[in-house]
Image: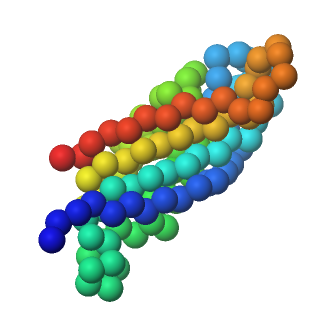
Amino acid sequence: MTGVDRIEIFGISGRGYHGVLESERVAGQDFSVDLILGVDRAGSRDSLADTVDYSVVAERAHAVLTGEPVDLIETVAERIVDVCRDLPGISFMEVAVHKPQAPIAVPFRDVVVRIRREFR
C-alpha cells in the first residue's frame, strides 16, 4: 500500500522586518507561518528515523521568518521551502505566510501568501 500522509504545523510566529516600506523594515511586525508537509506513510513504522522531524522544519521556518529581511512575503515562503528541501522524506511542502499587520488602508483581517512545491 502506498500513500502520502500530511504533517501540519500551524501558527509558527515571530517578529520580522519584511516589506517594501521603510517603516516595515524599521519597526518590524508580527508574522506567522502554517506548513503542510507531504510525507510517505509517516506512522507505518513508529520511528522518527522513518518520518520527518517536524521540530527541525519548524525551527528552520522560524529562522527564515525572523531572519534576513526581504521585500515580499512570497520570497519568505520560497525561502522556507528552500531551507527544508534537503530534509529526507518530504514529497511536497505547502507554506502559508500570514502578514496581519500589512500596510493596507482599509479594514482587513489578514494577508496570506500560500505556495505549494513538489520535492520529487
Residue nearest the viewer, comparing 29 with 26: 29
Total numbered circles: 0
The quadrant in which the N terminus is found is bottom left
Residue at (27, 42) in percent of width and height: 118
Tell me where residue 24 appears, x and y as whole percent.
Answer: 74, 25
Where's residue 92, x and y in %?
31, 49
- Residue 26 seen from this side: no
Residue depicted at x 64% and y 53%: 11
> Could you say which is closer to the camera, residue 2 or residue 82?
2
Q: Can you give x and y, in whole percent of width and height, for residue 8 in the image? A: 49, 59
Q: Is residue 118 above or below residue 57?
A: above
- Report the residue at 43% width, 35% height from top: 115
Residue 17, compared with residue 81, is above or below; it is above
Q: Nearer the viewer, residue 30 or 8?
A: 8
Residue 114 image point, x, y percent: 49, 35
Q: Is residue 102 left or right of residue 92?
A: right
